[in-house]
Image: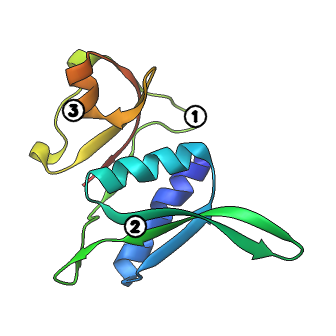
Amino acid sequence: MSSIANMLVQLKNAQAAGLSNVTVPFSRMKFEIAKVLEKRGFIEEVEEKKKKMRKAEVPCLSLKLKYEDGVGAINGIKLVSKQSRRVYVQKADLKPVRSGYGILVVSTSKGLMTGDEARKAGLGGEALFEIW
């Protein structure tokens, strides 16, 4: 979970600094999270790349941040589950984030999805983070 938290903090800080791209180490979980964020319009593009580090090539994710009129799409991120405290939600507990302006990312038995998608599918799971 801490590598996911690091990725999210890197996204938030890069957006605050006005950077256009962020590169993070690859994992399937991070890739799925990035795809959910891309689908919901928080980032523009997700690309898997190989980065040369010393003598080997290391897989990385290149994330292109989204800006509209110079304002970043990501305003805030709140981690719900942490290494020390996992938070699980049932479908009845999935509520809109920031009156519908944000999303909750949930890890379900059918994969990663937003809280809205999980509620419609009738699934619960581990609530990972909120983003708005």
Q: Which is nearer the N-term, disc 1 or disc 2? A: 2
Q: Is residue 105 something that shows in the picture?
A: yes
Q: Amino acid at mark 2?
A: Lys
Q: Amino acid at mark 1?
A: Ser
Give the distance between the C-alpha atoms of the residues marked 1 and 3, in whole angstroms: 26 Å
In the rendered structure, the answer to whether residue 31 lies left or right of residue 17 reads right
Determine the secondary structure under disc 2. Answer: helix
What residue do we see at 58% from left, 37% from top? 83
Q: In the figure, 130 relative to 44: above or below?
A: above
What's the residue type where badge 3 is placed?
Asp
Residue drawn at point x = 25 percent, y = 67 percent: 73
In the image, 120: left or right of 23? left
Q: Which mark is residue 12?
A: 2
Q: Nearer the viewer, mark 1 or mark 3?
A: 3
Per the image, label 1 sits on a secondary structure element best described as loop
Q: Which residue is mark 3?
A: 116
At numbered mark 3, what does the secondary structure look like: helix, strand or loop? helix
Give the vertical position of 131 relative to 55 (above or below). above
Q: Which of the two marks, 3 or 2, is nearer to us in this view?
A: 3
Q: Which of the two residues, 41 or 77, is positioned nearer the viewer here?
A: 41
The mark found on residue 84 in the picture is 1
Query: Left or right: where does residue 5 sit relative to residue 26?
Result: left
Expressed as whole percent of the image width and height from the top left, the position of residue 39 reads 30, 51
